[in-house]
Amino acid sequence: MVWRWTTSDDLLRIAQAVLITSVLYVIIIVSLNLRFTPKVPIIVSLLLLSFMMGARGLARFISTGGNIMALSALFRPALPNAPPAIMVGGTDMVTLAIHQARKSGPLPFKPLAIISTKGNQIGKVYSGARVYSGENFNETLQQLIKRALTEYNYSHVRIILVGDNHPEYVKQAAIGAMNDKKVRLSRMPEIGSKRLSNVNPEDVLGRHKYDLDPSGPSKLIEGKTILITGGGGTIGSELALQVATFNPKKIVIVDNSENNLYTINQIIGERFPQIETVIRLKDIRDYRSIDDLFDTYLPQIVFHAAANKHVPLMEEHPREAIMVNLGGTKNVADAALRTGVEAFILISTDKAVNPTNLMGAAKRAAELYVRYCFEKSGSKFFSTRFGNVLGSSGSVMPLFERQISAMGPVTVTSKEMTRWFMTVKEAVGLVLQSAALGGGMITGKNGKKVKYNYPLFVLDMGEPMKIISFAEAMIRLKGYEPYKDIDIIETGVRPGEKIHEEIFYDYEKAVETPVDGVLGVKSSKELDENLIELIEKTVKAATKNDIRETLKLLERIVPGYKVSKK
């Protein structure tokens, strides 16, 4: 047992062990016809209980800082109808979570076992729950579930994931266990919180949670005018909300959707009433309007998130893909270059790497133009490239949720297709860190600010996940069994889609930075000397709706890209 976390359950087990030992002692003495004083077993038992319980009580008392009232948590049992629970996480984290939950009242669960994902204190018992190794996690989990349902005869058992940083195999095994209707899955999101919550689709990604230092973004943003294009979209609105936490002088939010603008303006007004917020209904394809915007507000930091992102849809609308993703980026970047911004950050995508679709090719051309601006501006323009944002408009999660609500079928384009996923909060947090890196606001190991002169940053995307695995996980999280309750069908790869995305070109080299989760990128390939001329001709051809010429020029800007024949 972990003495500093001793509970009433542990004291009861000690009392039972001492009683059994004493009874066995008497039986052996009597059976051997040995003489003994009847008082001896009683006195020895009391002494054992006193020493063993006293030592543990003292350890518990010391661990609470001498707080006598905290000892009352020793005698708080679980709620009468509390569900039996298999706790998963680092042993110290789980034991601390149980301890903290006891301090505020009866436990809302009854610990049966602890599976340690850190591999420490194996075999010890805390609060009646033995600690098991997580080395063979799925096998151990299945054995404990079977024991709880058969040997202990519980009607159901609950798996509780404690904390946030669980490997993907742990989450997948826990979700897979829900195929048994008697198994429930919950999580304790924070140490010190006794509230059990549902496991969300975001929780199954198995991504490492980065502990980000807010000082860099704060130095970049505080007291300045920040402009965010596409500020009503999934990424743009989260950018606006996170930027607001760093006390900017003013946030100028640009979007072509009046509903999106209205919504984000309401949210910021409610959460950050002290921040001056300006909303502007603008189309980034209109360079005159964008020039007027920059002249009016003179932003110091620009986050360019506006883009057309839907791959199959852009295959059918090539003019819109070019006019927005390339032409719109050029308009915003030109205005930023002309007015002398301190930092410009383009939100890019993994689809810009060896693109097989118009959306990705246009974003790659935009990356190249930002690199040109980087060289022309003295290293003030950057692109930040990353994969899919979970829950964004047009992503698989809202689609799967609708299909599951209708009891299926859930559709995937290919059972082999993989994608990188990250949550919008994580993506935006890392984008702000990359902006701080580019802006020279991150402090290095020597305590001095270091400016990383890379025109491109890439977010650490971890391991890609199969789309079908994500679909299966979502179905299980809703309490259904894939292929039995809700079917999953394959519909075929759509125009422009890849089976597997990439995050780097062959000629790009990742460079570590002081920020975990953000990589600098060095390219061994120089910009085409005709790049600007080609981009201007491409945008001009798209403006005239000369699609054939537009696509022909785009193939020259992005070597290796070939227009789909479909």
Image (cartoon, rainbow, N blue to C red):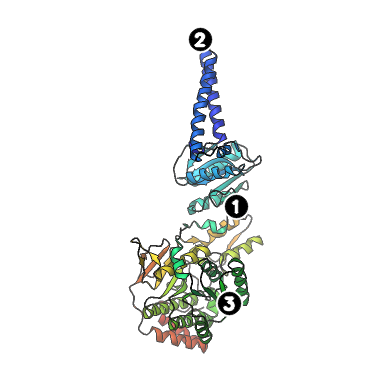
Q: Give the residue type at disc 2.
A: Arg
Q: Residue at x 63, y 42 (%)?
A: 82
Instruction: Tell which residue pokes out farthest to the bottom in this image.
Output: 544
State the image coordinates of residue 500 (x, y, percent, origin top left).
Answer: 46, 66
Task: Give residue 31's position: percent from left, percent from top.
Answer: 52, 13
Q: Residues within 10 Å of mark 2 (few under 14, many from 20)?
A: few
First-in-chain label (3 vs 2): 2
User: Element under label 1?
Assistant: strand
The front one of 17 and 410 is: 17
Give the residue at mark 1.
197
Q: Is residue 177 left or right of residue 407?
A: left
Give the alpha-carbon distance from disc 1 to disc 2, as whole Å. Answer: 61 Å
In which image quadrant can residue 156 be found? top right
Can the viewer see residue 285 in this picture?
A: no
Could you say whether the residue bearing mark 2 is in a helix, strand or loop? Answer: loop
At 41% from the left and 62% from the top, the residue drawn is 515
Q: How many marks?
A: 3
- Visible in this render: residue 35? yes
> Residue 528 appears at what percent x and percent y?
36, 81
- Pointer 2 residue: 35
Of the numbered discs in the image, which one, if any, rests on residue 279? 3
The amino acid at mark 1 is Ser
